[in-house]
Amino acid sequence: MKAWIKLLAGITGLGGSLLAYALWAERPRLRVQTYRLPAPSPQAVGLRLLHLSDQHLGGESWVQQRRLGQLQAILPGLQVDAVMMTGDFLHDAAGLVAVESMLQMLPPARLGYYAVMGNHDYAQYSYGELLRNAWVNIRQQRQPTRCLRATVQEVRRLSQLLWQIWHNERLRFAAVPNPTSELQALLALYNVQVLQNSAVPLGNSSIWLAGVDDWIEGQPDVAQALAAVPPHAPLWLLTHHPDVAYHVRDTRLQLALAGHTHGGQVVLPWLGAVHTQGSLLSRHKPAGVFRDLPSHALMVVSRGMGESTPLRVGCPPEVVVIELLPKQASDSAS
């Protein structure tokens, strides 16, 4: 009996330690991830890009304040040609203040600042709201048979959600609207161009940059996004959800930047990411550099700076810097 008690105590202690680590140890450790990649065209040789994604900024918390402090130490000193932001600035409406703080830290970028919207920029997903709505629906039923039927219905809905999470399907539930218009106005105030199914030249270069609206909460239209791009122009793409890039077969596409997956947040040995949030990315590689797009373009998926659920294991938050080098130099670069 004592052996079982010791075993149970050990398991409980280990579980508590892992949970404490996931909640508090890895989340504040923002790092700079540098990718040195072959320039996809002669026009891109030597360009240095800053890629920011998935800040998930909300009301004040010590983790958020720690990250903003680290950004203040990192961003102003970076030398970059363009800043690309791939959505999920907001976690909830209170995050607008922190978004402005981050925008004030951005380094100079001669080719400009660009962004697309993420699903959380449109809506906050709330597990609490989901459970609350289920409970209200059950309690509103006056007859026992209807109450039982409602209970079965809500249990089925919750089970379906868990099934979608496990299979990395696109999720949308208990959405509370976020202040999208206010966010876009704030970005415009700091000279950030928000690309919603549209394309523009990248600064004064001959490269064109297209942006697609969010795959889940927005109104994505790839054809509309690419419509204005000249026939033979080098094309880059910003999208929040990486699955979008796999639906682009245009061979003009050379480079795609995305976020959304958070790198899986919880990445376990052998299993990989518990949840990738992207149906076309594997559990063993939910972020990083990808070379398997139908267009043959390179894609960089950021692990992001924040989280939708406050857990990270084996997947620290990151700021991404991309250096586009001549092919010979990139072959030997890490």
Image (cartoon, rainbow, N blue to C red):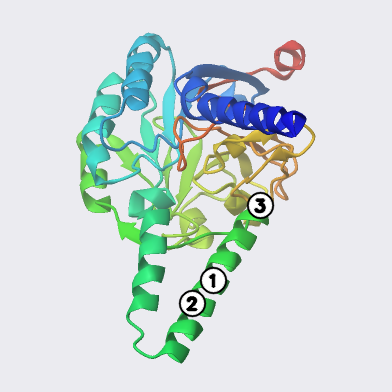
Q: Which one is nearer the viewer's eye here, 196 or 11?
A: 11
Estimate the x, y position of residue 87 in percent, counting from the top left.
Answer: 42, 42
Q: Which mark is residue 246?
A: 3
Mark closer to the observer (1, 3): 1
| Local SS, label 1 | helix
Name the residue located 66 percent from the left edge and 52 percent from the top edge: 246
Quadrant location of residue 75? top left
For the residues labelled 2 and 1, the Cα–Cα distance comes to: 6 Å
| Local SS, label 2 | helix
Q: Which residue is mark 1?
A: 155
Estimate the x, y position of residue 80 in percent, counting from the top left.
Answer: 44, 17
Tag 2–tag 1 contact (CB < 8 Å): yes
Please give left or right for residue 23 compared with residue 113 in the image.
Answer: right
Nearer the N terminus, badge 1 or badge 3?
Answer: 1
Q: Residue furthest front?
A: 1
The three-letter code of the residue at mark 3 reads: Tyr
Within 10 Å of the Cα at label 1, are there few (<14), some (14-19), or many (20+) other Cα atoms?
few
Q: Which one is nearer the viewer's eye here, 89 or 63?
A: 63
Q: Which residue is mark 2?
A: 151
Within 10 Å of the Cα at label 2, are there few (<14), some (14-19), or many (20+) other Cα atoms?
some
Estimate the x, y position of residue 323 in percent, counting from the top left.
Answer: 58, 19
Q: Is residue 6 above or below residue 271?
A: above
Q: Dividing the image into 4 quarters, which one contains the N terminus?
A: top right
